[in-house]
Image: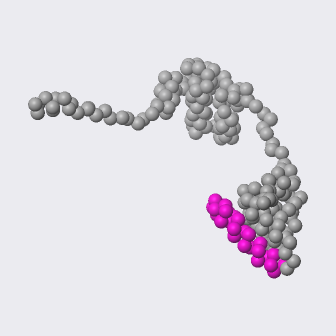
Amino acid sequence: MTFDLEYNSERPLMIIPEYGRHVQKLVNHCIALESIEERNEMAKAIVDVMGNLQPHLRDVPDFKHKLWDQLYIMSDFKLDAKSPYPQPSKEELQEKPEPLAYPKSTSKYRYYGKNIQTMIDVALSWEEGDMREALVFSIANHMKKCYLNWNKDTVDDDVIFKHLLDLSDGNLDLRNSEEDLSETKDLLKKRNSQGQNTTKTTYKKPHNNQNKNRKRQ
């Protein structure tokens, strides 16, 4: 008795392995059908089977469209069947995506983050007045907090004012201001309170079974 064994290395390559080899065989059989009506009917049935095998796609918008695209991909774009959606092209699938544009400008005060620069630009766009002054001091306090988080446990306000002047290209100058920033201990206290675990555990006194046993005796 002889057995005809098939090894995966000898089988045709599966284009989308997630659906398994049986679905790939169904797609190949659908391509070989001569009648366009039979191909259309079998293609719809294959799409339904693919949808049952990938139930998570039901939450994806236009999941039917994605299934039909995958059907054409599995057929190596050789399937001649009517689809309710535009048929994708092989060139479109093989097209390389456009390269992403990475920011080329880097700040020398990276520990402040990029949002600080955005906040400074917004402050510069405001008209001078109490609102702008309050915003500038809020930015300076946030810069001081960032400095304490990533550098040291203490910092002078003059250092923050100098960095703010540098980041604003000399337009925001608080060096001669009579108002001080928040105290370092207050900022560190807020930082530590945010990192602490607020859950509390209650301690229950264990029952003294020995005393009860003594009374019974």
Specify the quadrant of the image occupied by residue 94: bottom right
Task: Give the image location of residue 11, x and y in percent.
Answer: 83, 56
Where is the N terminus found, in terms of image quarters? bottom right
Most foreground residue, 189 or 71: 71
Most foreground residue, 136 or 186: 186
Task: Give the image location of residue 152, x and y in percent.
Answer: 59, 20
User: Residue at image x 57%, y 34%?
Assistant: 138
Specify the quadrant of the image occupied by residue 130: top right
Most foreground residue, 19 or 90: 19
User: Residue at image x 82%, y 51%?
Assistant: 9
Q: Is-magenta flag for residue 39?
A: yes
User: Residue at image x 63%, y 20%?
Assistant: 159
Specify the quadrant of the image occupied by residue 180: top right
Residue found at the far right of this picture: 91
Q: Is-magenta flag for residue 93?
A: no
Q: Is any atom of residue 170 visible in this view? A: no
Apparent side of residue 173 relative to residue 80 in the rendered image (left or right): left
Q: Which residues are magenta?
A: 36-64
User: Residue at image x 77%, y 72%?
Assistant: 43
Task: Give the image location of residue 13, x and y in percent.
Answer: 83, 56
